[in-house]
Image (tube, helix red, strand yellow):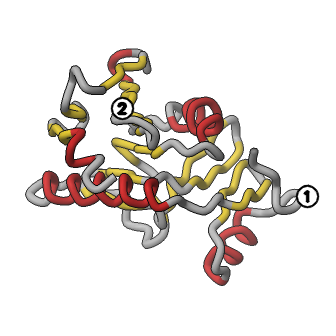
């Protein structure tokens, strides 16, 4: 469960200044700052495998893939949010800020015991409010399975597992083999 670092309102400017100077990452949700949970070896391996596969598959395209140290920034109900997705892809030329993306096309979260509830509920509703987002993907650490939510399918869940050996990312028109995602795990 996430607990606010401070129970008082923090301005966006103060949050960004603290993130720039700090060693620990925090997410910003409408004025409140939350510390990030540490990753496991498996989480890191899966995220790295996905990032590597995406970088290779997208290298001749205008798309850019980013891993967990780059934030997504958006507004929801007049509040500003900054999250650190595990993986994010943009192809929007307006995304030029060195520390965050405002127009992601794809966001991927690798589920962990400490973040699964947040990724499936809170982040699902927050991310799917981002106008540019076409797909949101949840990848399991405990089994070879991913769940894809697509805007053009009204965010209905599509499970990918043994029967479907590849994760089809329609927003990028690419496929990533589950064996590549779970390589070394």
Residue positioned 43% across, 72% down in the render: 98
Q: Residue 82 location, x and y as percent?
A: 60, 55
Q: Is residue 137 above or below residue 66?
A: above
Quarter assignment of residue 131: top left
Circle 2 is placed at which residue position?
Answer: 145
Quadrant where the N terminus sits is: top right
Q: Residue 58 location, x and y as percent?
A: 16, 53
Q: Could you say whether the residue bearing mark 1 is in a helix, strand or loop?
A: loop
Q: Could you say whether the residue bearing mark 2 is in a helix, strand or loop?
A: loop
Q: Nearer the viewer, residue 182 or 19?
A: 182
Q: Nearer the viewer, residue 55 or 100?
A: 55
- Horizontal side of 108 relative to 125 (left or right) equals left
Q: Residue 176 location, x and y as percent?
A: 19, 41
Which residue reaches farthest left? 60
Residue positioned 24% across, 34% down in the render: 167
Circle 1 is placed at which residue position?
Answer: 8
Q: Disc 1 or 2, which lies upstream in sequence? A: 1
Residue depth check, mark 1 versus mark 2: number of the one nearer the observer: 2
Quarter assignment of residue 78: top right
């Amino acid at each position: 469960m996430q607990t606010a670092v401070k129970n008082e309102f923090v301005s966006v400017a103060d949050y960004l200044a603290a993130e720039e100077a700090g060693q620990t990452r925090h997410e910003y949700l409408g004025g409140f700052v939350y510390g990030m949970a540490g990753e496991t070896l498996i989480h890191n391996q899966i995220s790295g495998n996905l990032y590597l596969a995406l970088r290779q598959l997208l290298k001749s395209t205008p798309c850019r893939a980013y891993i967990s140290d780059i934030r997504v920034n958006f507004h929801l109900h007049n509040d500003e949010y900054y999250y650190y997705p595990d993986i994010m892809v943009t192809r929007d030329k307006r995304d030029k800020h060195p520390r965050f993306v405002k127009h992601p096309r794809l966001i991927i979260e690798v589920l962990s015991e400490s973040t699964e509830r947040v990724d499936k509920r809170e982040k699902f509703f927050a991310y799917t409010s981002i106008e540019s987002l076409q797909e949101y993907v949840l990848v399991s650490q405990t089994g070879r399975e991913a769940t894809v939510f697509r805007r053009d399918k009204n965010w209905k869940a599509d499970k990918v597992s043994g029967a479907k050996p590849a994760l089809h990312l329609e927003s990028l028109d690419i496929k990533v083999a589950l064996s590549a995602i779970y390589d070394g795990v």
